[in-house]
Amino acid sequence: MVNRKDGLLAALTIGIMSPDFIAFAMSQMFSPKQKELFKKRLEGLPLTKTEQEYYSRSVKKKVVALANAELHGLARKLLEK
């Protein structure tokens, strides 16, 4: 039987992740409201002034960290151990 860690490494290695896995991973990083704002920005929908302020203050920082290639590489190394 494949354990969760091996399954995650396999998904990362071949670059295929199911929508359910992506939703799970997002729920580990973002609150429900943050996920909503993330999706709105991704879809190009307008944000209210309050949403934009919250997005800039909290969500954007996490997105920038997730997009960092060096940090991503370090996280993958930790998963391989």
Image (cartoon, rainbow, N blue to C red):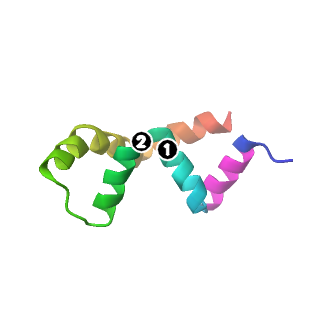
Relative depth, front residue between 69 and 62: 62
- Side of 42 relative to 27 (left or right): left
Q: Secondary structure at mark 2?
A: loop
> x%, y% of residue 36?
36, 53
Total count of labels: 2
Q: Which residue is mark 2?
A: 30
Circle 1: residue type: Ser
Residue 6 sits in which quadrant? top right
Q: Residues within 10 Å of mark 2 (few under 14, many from 20)?
A: some
Q: Which residue is mark 1?
A: 27
Question: Magenta segment range?
Answer: 6-14
> x%, y% of residue 39?
36, 58
- Side of 24 relative to 33 (left or right): right
Q: Residues within 10 Å of mark 1 (few under 14, many from 20)?
A: few
- Side of 16 relative to 59 (left or right): right
Magenta stretch encompasses residue 74: no
> x%, y% of residue 58?
28, 38
Relative depth, front residue between 35 and 13: 35
| Residues tagged 2 and 1 counted as in contact (Cβ below 8 A) | yes
Residue at 72%, 43% in the rendered image = 4
Q: CA distance from mark 2 to mark 1?
A: 5 Å
Q: Secondary structure at mark 1?
A: helix
Residue 60 sits in which quadrant? top left
Whether residue 25 appears in this view of the structure is yes
Residue at 49%, 44% in the rendered image = 27
